Each structure stands twice: as C-alpha cells, then as structure tokens.
Image (cartoon, rainbow, N blue to C red):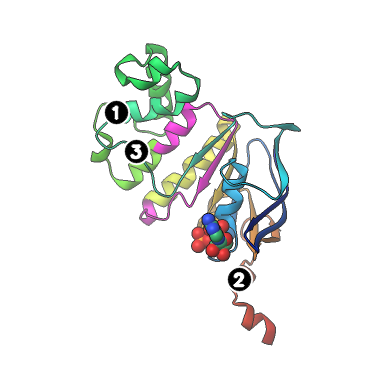
Amino acid sequence: MLALSGITVRYGERQVLHGVDVDVARGELLAVLGANGSGKSTLLRAAAGLEPMTAGSVGIDGKPCGPLDIAVVFQHIHLVRRRSVLENVCAGALGRLSLRHSLVPALFPRALREEAMACLDRVGLADRAHERAGRLSGGQQQRVAVARALCQRPRVLLADEPVSALDPAASEQVLALLAELAHDAGLAVLAVLHQPSLAARHADRVVGLRDGRVILDGPPGQDVDALYRPAVMEAVS
Ligand SMILES: Nc1ncnc2c1ncn2[C@@H]1O[C@H](COP(=O)(O)OP(=O)(O)OP(=O)(O)O)[C@@H](O)[C@H]1O
C-alpha cells in the first residue's frame, strides 16, 4: 500500500538517507529500528511530506498520496491542553472542514463530534471525552493523539517514537493499539521505535536502518544487534 522508493535526503553536504526503499502493506504494523542518527525520523518526515527529498517518491497503491492520506503521531504529543479531549480529536478533521468551522470549536458539526467520539471509543477513552486534555496521563494523551490522527480518516498512520515518554505498561498499550488499527481497521502503520523488544512483540515486520541505509528487513524477533553496534567495533570484529 505505502511505497517509499529511493528516498534520498541531504542536509547540505551530508547525505542522511541513501535511496531507502520501504513498503508497508495494508493491515501491517511495520517497526523501524536503528541507532540514534541512523535516519529514522528523517525517513518518517519524508514519508509525511515534511522533509524535502533530493530524490525518491512516496506512493499509495501506485499513486501519489493525497494531503489527508497520511496521518502522523509524534513523540511530543501536541494536544491543546486546555481544550477538551473531544475537541482535540475533532482537530484531526480540520483539513476537510470549512475555514469557519475549523476556527471555532463550538461550530464543529455534530457529525464530526460523533465521528470523533467513535475514534475515542476505538482508543478506549470515550469516557474522558469532555475532560480537559491536559488532565490526562501521558499514555492517555498519546492515545488521544492516535484518535485525532484517526479522525483525519487516513489510509496510512506514521508514528515517530510514540512511546518514548511512556512507562512500560502504557507503551504496551499504545503499541497494541497501533497493531489493532493495522489489523482491524486496515491501515498501513509505520512506527519508529527505540525498543526492539516492543517491536518483537507487536510489529508484523521490522526494518532496520543504519547510517541512512536499510540493512535489515524481516519478521520480528530477529537479532537486531548489528543496528546498534558502533562502527569501530564493526571494524575490529
Ligand atoms: N534539520 C536538520 N539539519 C541538519 N541535520 C539534520 C537535521 N535533522 C536531522 N539531521 C541529521 O540527520 C541524521 C539523521 O537524523 P534523524 O533524526 O533522522 O535520526 P534518528 O534515527 O531519528 O535519530 P534518533 O534516534 O536520535 O531520533 C542525524 O545525523 C542528524 O544529525
């Protein structure tokens, strides 16, 4: 479904992605692993259209993707803390609302509120819909961010280190949710992770980046040590 082809990104003289090819099928949760600086976030941003590419393309089902096809969940959750949980989720739909409706939460159409409620139900937080977002725990806020992404009605969900700030139990919950959205809602989900064990438990496939290149692509649970071994160790081993 999602095809990242030949993704190449340079910052000045420095090339940080070297023609990376990654695809994610409908219904699949793909985990992207790699050491700090290997290019994971750059790849995700390029996929989301947030990073200019020197070369490469992003396609969905063989066509260029539309502006609302891809939703992104970031490590830093960026909810409007003083707004209700429900209004935050409605914000996921701003790209398809009229300007008038999008500027004033009180004018969010009833159908949108109902859809946002269904998205909250999906992440298990419908009962918190009318609380201020800032009152929820970090793990709950991340699930609200996922609900907001769902309210965009995307075909692809990208998550950049979505559990870095969460405790182990909340991390398991968010990863289980991402897997469920892939398997049950038929999204293609790509998650950048720093925890190989979480990837092994929840992902359907794992891609490993090293120095801006894919050096591993296969089932979860395989040996990923090579991704994290310092280059100097590599040279002497
Ligand atoms: N805006 C930028 N300008 C210049 N260099 C950048 C920029 N963003 C990232 N880089 C460089 O690109 C390389 C890849 O960075 P990226 O953030 O994609 O890595 P990462 O694998 O996500 O790392 P981490 O695990 O630490 O988040 C790094 O060397 C980084 O310093």
* SS type, badge 1: helix
Check residue 161 for magenta coloring: yes
The residue wearing badge 2 is 225
Query: Marks 3 and 1: in contact by CB < 8 Å?
Result: no
Callout 1: CB less than 8 Å from ligand 1: no
The residue wearing badge 1 is 127
Residue 6 seen in this snapshot: yes
Measuring 34% from the left and 41% from the top, which residue is drawn there? 141
Measuring 38% from the left and 44% from the top, which residue is drawn there? 77
**Which residues make up the magenta segment?**
145-169
> Could you say which quadrant of the image residue 61 lies in?
top right
The residue wearing badge 3 is 79
Q: Amino acid at mark 3?
A: Leu
Check residue 81 for magenta coloring: no
Q: Amino acid at mark 1?
A: Asp
- Residue 102, image x, y percentages: 39, 20
Mark 1 / mark 3, whichever is N-terminal: 3
Mark 3 / mark 2, whichever is N-terminal: 3
**In screen coordinates, is 151 left or right of 223?**
left
- Residue 85, image x, y percentages: 31, 31
Cα gap from disc 2 to disc 1, whole angstroms: 42 Å
Circle 3 crowding by C-alpha within 10 Å: few under 14, some 14–19, many from 20: many
Callout 2: CB less than 8 Å from ligand 1: no
Query: Marks 1 and 2: in contact by CB < 8 Å?
Result: no
Circle 1 crowding by C-alpha within 10 Å: few under 14, some 14–19, many from 20: few
- Residue 112, image x, y percentages: 41, 17
Examine the rendered structure and indicate whether residue 221 appears above or below residue 114: below
**In screen coordinates, is 77 left or right of 95?**
left
Split into quadrants, the picture shows ligand 1 in the one at bottom right
- Residue 208, image x, y percentages: 64, 60
